[in-house]
Each structure stands twice: as C-alpha cells, then as structure tokens.
Image (spheres, rainbow, N blue to C red):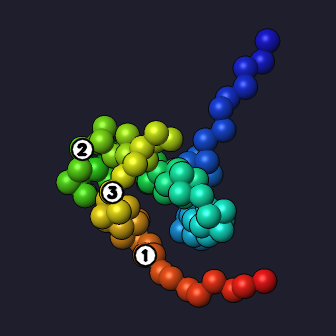
Amino acid sequence: METVKDFDPAEYIDNKEVAVEYLKAALAENDTKFLLRAIGDIARSKGMVQLSQELNLDRKGLYKAFSPEGNPSFSTVVKLLDNLGFRLSVEQKVSA
C-alpha cells in the first residue's frame, strides 16, 4: 500500500524569488490567514530554530504564531519579514 505524504509548501521555497511570488499570491487573495500561513511557510523553509534565535523569540511561540490558529502581532510579522529579507509596501488599489 502506498502512503501519501502531506503537501508542505516550505519544502519548495528554495530561493527569494519563489518566496516573493508566494507572498504576492497570498496578498492578492486578500485573506489574512492565508498570508500568515504563507509567511509561516517561508519561515519554516529557512528554519524556525535559527529564526527564533536571530529574533530572540521563543521557538514554540513562533511556530504557534504562524500556525493556522495563530494570531501574531503586527510587530512580530514585520520583524520576521525583515529578518527574511522582505518588507511590506502599500500601493493604491486599481478599481475595475
């Protein structure tokens, strides 16, 4: 019998270009939970242990914050994105 492994996006995020496209796609969905999940996937692709040490945050807390049930503070999101080499920006929405 064959077993099917759960899909883990973090396994496919192997460079910044892929991560940027993933973040753009998540932002385009206008879904906060999906965006946070994408950020968490990117963080896991780098390594949560390393990130938690670099950010001086609790590893378990970082996992929990970016889990499907998580609700990280805005400052944690910005801090994590900065550490990953990204920043948020705002642009005017184009009306259809």
51 and 39: which is toward the camera = 39
| Tag shown at residue 73 | 3
Q: Which is more N-terminal, label 2 or label 3?
A: 2
SS for dot 1: loop
Residue occupied by mark 2: 58
Please state which amino acid type lies under the numbered disc 1.
Arg
Q: In the image, what residue occupies the spot 54% across and 68% down? A: 16
- Mark closer to the observer (3, 1): 3
State the image coordinates of residue 70 (x, y, percent, origin top left).
42, 43
Q: Which is more N-terminal, label 1 or label 2?
A: 2
Q: Toward which corner of the image does residue 94 lie, by quadrant? A: bottom right
Q: Residue furthest front?
A: 95
Distance from disc 2 to disc 1, alpha carbons, whole Å, reads: 22 Å
Residue occupied by mark 1: 87
Q: In the image, what residue occupies the spot 43% across and 75% down? A: 87
SS for dot 2: loop
Distance from disc 3 to disc 1, alpha carbons, whole Å, reads: 16 Å
